[in-house]
Image (cartoon, rainbow, N blue to C red):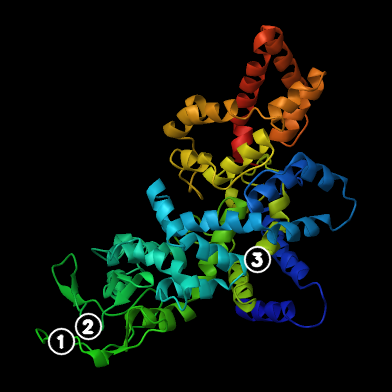
Amino acid sequence: MRYLQLFLLSALMFSPAGAAEKDRATTQINSFLESHWTELKISPAEPASESDYIRRIYLDLVGRIPTRLERKNYLADQRTDKQEHLVDQLLNSEDHIQHLTDIFDTLLMGRGSNHDYRERQNHQWRTWLEGEFRENRPWNEIVAKILMARPKSQDERGLVWFLYERKDNAQQIAEAIAPAFFGIRIDCAQCHDHFIATEIEQAHYWGLVAFFNRSKNTNTPNGPRVSESAIGGYTEFANLEGGSTPNFLTFFQSTTVDEARPEKDQKQEDMAELYRNPVQPGSPRVPQFSRREKFVEEIVKQHPLIARAFVNRIWAMLLGRGIVHPFDEMDSVHPPSHPELLDWLAEDFRQSGYNIRRLTRNIVLCRAYQLDSRQPSGIDDPATFAWYLERPLTAEQLARSMQLAVQGSFRNDHPLFEQLRKPLPEVLPETISTGIAEALFYSNNPAVNEFLKNSSGPESLISQVMKLDSSIDQVNLLCETVYGRSAGQDEMEQVAAYLKSTPSDSVRQRWEQILWALLTNAEFHFNH
């Protein structure tokens, strides 16, 4: 019955009648959530204030806080559909492309060292990923390109880097692919079937390894490429009982791909007729039977988790946790909090042509996204999405927002990015906690102090504050710029008392210290 309902809802969504397709999608999301609240007999939080909403949406869609002018213009807008206008404006901005690339570069590749980031940039991985998001390419096509790793032109050369950076380590590649694209972790199945999520088998781990164990990093006239042999890779894996099994080409929730296997000890010859010419001259030849190609064509393109894992991840990015939590452990041990909603979102995403921007729009316009972040009394389970879940800013969000608040503009190549990535490694943390490195960074890191000291130009926030005569106006300017709100009475009193005890020749330094306190406060480095 549920799947008939999903089919009818999808048919309604994409019928030519009516122009409010996206509005209907958001309405459907609301319906699933509100039904769950009714079933639990709970009342969600009140809607967030407009000031909180605009800060939230800027951080989530463009990776930075809004400027005072952007905030002022939004608050003054009298249109009844101003949220939709703002969301569309942000989703079609270059800032959104940079922010989305920041997020997925880290989710797909890991944090890495500063050297790793430079390599990704030099070899066009980031440029390629930006281009895919800029053109709003379907997610399933992006996945297929990354895993096939065969550029058709020099413009696509960066797509090889997901495999290339893992340096011919087929196990490392398999352990990255499963959570990145399928939302499951198979690491525990290396030596045995998963003890708890028993549907994840040892054969799935080694089958995924087999799809990539013929691949090898190669330098070509076109630059780094991932070649593939037509022979070899017929290994076996041992179980805990001491038995061994051939690593057939198989994966979780998929059939086994047929492949002719040589007899034991039969020697194979790597002959030219086993290959075809590459699409791009100068790149490695392609096996007539390509394991990577079979994985993309027969596993990836029809796998139900490609859509399901992606919508769960985008939901987690925007609402603080996935419908399945953690977002990369979509197994029987971690059931969805809203199974019908997840089913519907995945089917809707497939029907839309894996449209990333449309999915994002529908989620940020839903009711749950717009709730206040103060937890309602008597509701303890965050999986209800009955209030907006606070989460820390990423290193990139913080680097942009600090520049914008302090200097009035930002650069995506500012040294703050490198300085913040190490102490702030998480992008979508499973649990929110402030580690020792992060706490020490906020309390005693020379990078922030040096940044403030060097931000003394006429457009800087401190310079603007010192032009004002009224301490009330000064504190308000600080709070409106940094926090997106007016200063409270207690804040004004504390600042006034602090300045009163300050010698006149060090007033600017004191204002810098006040700004430092605002920037390192939890209110600034959390999205709420």
- Residue at image position (44%, 63%) is 180
Q: Secondary structure at mark 2?
A: loop
Q: What's the residue type where badge 2 is placed?
A: Ile
Report whether 249 appears left or right of 360. left
Q: What's the residue type where badge 1 is placed?
A: Gln
Read off the residue under disc 1.
268
Q: Position of residue 494 (x, y in %)?
A: 70, 16
Does label 2 or label 1 sit earlier along the sequence?
A: 2
Q: Secondary structure at mark 1?
A: loop
Which numbered mark, 3 or 2, is in the foreground of this view? Answer: 2
Looking at the picture, does residue 255 appear above or below residue 195? below
Tell me if mark 2 has few (under 14), some (14-19) or many (20+) residues whose alpha carbon lies within 10 angstroms of its own: some
Q: What's the residue type where badge 3 is placed?
A: Arg
Say which quadrant the C terminus sits in: top right
Report whether 375 appears left or right of 240. right
Read off the residue under disc 3.
357
- Residue at image position (62%, 65%) is 134
Q: Residue furthest bottom?
A: 273
Q: Residue furthest right?
A: 78
Residue in the foreground of this view, choosing between 245 and 32: 245
**Disc 1 to disc 3, C-alpha distance:** 48 Å
Say which quadrant the N terminus sits in: bottom right
Residue in the foreground of this view, choosing between 177 and 336: 177
- Residue at image position (83%, 46%) is 73
Looking at the picture, does residue 150 appear above or below residue 39? below
Q: Secondary structure at mark 3?
A: helix
Read off the residue under disc 2.
231
Looking at the picture, does residue 156 appear above or below residue 302? above
